[in-house]
Amino acid sequence: MENSFRLKDRIVFITGASSGIGKSCALSFAARGAHLILAARRIERVETLATELARAHGIQTLPLELDVTNRKAVFDAVQDLSPEWRKVEVLVNNAGKALGLDKSYETKIEHLEGMMETNVKGLVHVISAIVPGMVERNQGHVIQIGSTAGRWVYPGGTVYCATKHAVRALNEGLKMDVHGTNVRVSSVDPGLVETEFSIVRFDGDAERADKVYADMTPLSPHDVADAVLWCATRPPHVNISEILLMCTDQSHATLINRQTSDS
Ligand code: NDP
Ligand code: 8X3
């Protein structure tokens, strides 16, 4: 497109790049010629991805072992980047999780802390380390991965939904925080996406995770990456505030069309 924002040779920083939506975003941005900082705790996964994408697309890639819940580690990692890598043009603030499917008052403390620390505090740690540079350069784009869970609450999802409602507030507020600069802020808010999300939620129980996506066609992580890429490639004067996307089989948080063999 004539006025679209060109990503070639730009620096894109993706958190949670070892799996699912983050990994698909890496593939999409690599195909546009962006150079990628691929961050996650599972370093061996992002190292492999970094090598593959560099070879396939002739881009530069930097795998980064990073736990977004560790504020000091996040700041140190950004501070330690060489000056060229530090000029982050697009931040895909994606790392996140649901843990368990419990009533709010029955949520295990480790689940509560895991979700709050990652989805809310982790998001802010990464913003705090990267956005000041964007403001200084008067250029950049933060794209957060929110969720339908940031708009609607569903049984068993109270705490996770609370964290994603917080992401929505952070997104709205961040745009105001950078008001008057050229920094853009977007939120891409998907419904059900088949990734490792439910395996993580159910502590490795793949059978239970599979049931979440049974007898319907969920979004793929590539569908979400498409939306992220679309936000990132709008002309510089266009700020996409939010995109809400669900698969055709999902019409609301728990309104899901399942085609069982006997239906
Ligand atoms: P995955 O479990 O496939 O991916 C999650 C990613 O987050 C992994 O790369 C994981 O990497 C990373 N991550 C988790 N904890 C941390 C941490 N403390 N520090 C750094 N990275 C971390 O799930 P999805 O791709 O589905 O999830 C990505 C985002 O999309 C999340 O924010 C989720 O809430 C959101 N989302 C998901 C939907 C879905 O249905 N799947 C729908 C709507 C939103 P590692 O473990 O290597 O650190
Ligand atoms: C993930 C979507 O509905 O599983 O954010 O919470 S849902």
Image (cartoon, rainbow, N blue to C red):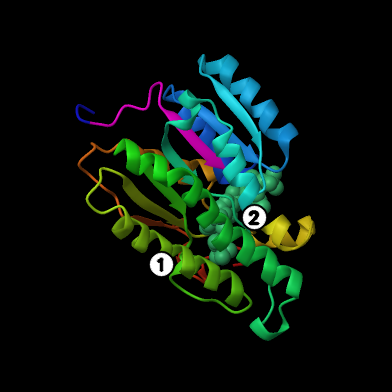
Residue type at numbered disc 1: Ala
Q: SS at mark 2?
A: loop
Residue type at numbered disc 2: Thr
Disc 2/disc 1 C-alpha distance (Å) = 19 Å
Crowd rating for badge 1 (residues with CA inside 10 Å; few <14, some 14–19, many 20+): few
Q: Position of residue 243 (x, y in %)?
A: 36, 55
Q: How many marks?
A: 2
Residue on which the image places disc 1: 169
Between marks 2 and 1 in the image, the one whose residue lies nearer the viewer: 2
**Is 46 displayed left or right of 225 in the figure?**
right
**Is 62 displayed left or right of 4 in the figure?**
right
Give ligand 2's quarter of the image: bottom right
Quadrant including the C terminus = bottom right
Residue lying at 55% horizontally and 76% vertically, measured from the top left? 154
Beta carbon at label 2 within 8 Å of ligand 1:
yes
Nearest the viewer among 195 and 39 is 39
Q: Give the magenta-colored segment's residue range.
A: 4-16
Query: From this viewpoint, is residue 258 visible?
Result: no
Q: Is residue 255 magenta?
A: no
Nearest the viewer among 263 and 124 is 124
Residue on which the image places disc 2: 69
